[in-house]
Amino acid sequence: MTIQEKQAEVVEDFDLFEDWMERYEYMISLGKTLPQIDENKKTTENIIKGCQSKVWLDAKLVDCKIIYTADSDAIITKGIIAILISVFNNQTPQEILNANLDFIDKIGLKEHLSPTRANGLVSMIKQIKMYALAYQTQLSK
């Protein structure tokens, strides 16, 4: 499934809910399904800077596709990173770098987050793309 198809699926899922309380509950449930980062990867180097909560993100390249794992000490933040990973997991670095992230606006995520969580969202996306850039550079050598 492409990144665009995965984004469309997220938008469709969020459209099922009437209000933001239900959407937050859904995000919390997504956080519980997050591909868990190994405990030994919960290091200072893997913490996403710019997030109010602690968010650890790790990535590895498998068959030219990136597999992300993550965790957070906050349930909403864990849900946010789970959404991002569901969109970007198992994609090539180039696909991730080229991705248009219009689904975030379509579901209204940024406008329903506190300013610090919205900054954290931007930091999460930036870190996901930094991993993609590093792996893309590695692949093109």
Image (tube, rainbow, N blue to C red):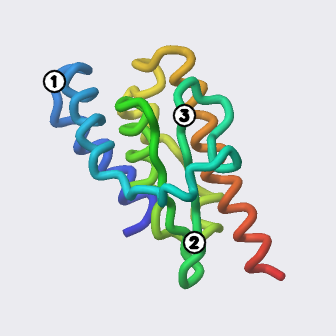
Which of the two labelled residues, at mark 3 and mark 2, occupies the earlier sequence position? 3
Which residue is denoted by mark 3 in the rendering? Answer: 54
Quick one: quadrant of the N terminus?
Answer: bottom left
Q: Quadrant of residue 120?
A: top right
Which residue occupies 58% across, 70% down? Answer: 60
Which residue is denoted by mark 2 in the rendering? Answer: 92
Q: Viewed as shown, does residue 61 lie left or right of 15?
A: right
Which of the two labelled residues, at mark 1 and mark 3, occupies the earlier sequence position? 1
Where residue 33 appears, x then y in whole percent? 28, 52
Which residue is denoted by mark 1 in the rendering? Answer: 18
Q: Amino acid at mark 2?
A: Thr
Disc nearest the viewer among 3 and 2: 3
Question: What kind of element bears circle 1?
Answer: loop
Q: CA distance from mark 3 to mark 2?
A: 26 Å
Which of the two labelled residues, at mark 2 and mark 1, occupies the earlier sequence position? 1
66 relative to 115, above or below: below
Q: Amino acid at mark 3?
A: Lys
Q: Residues within 10 Å of mark 2 (few under 14, many from 20)?
A: many
Which residue occupies 58% across, 41% down? Answer: 124
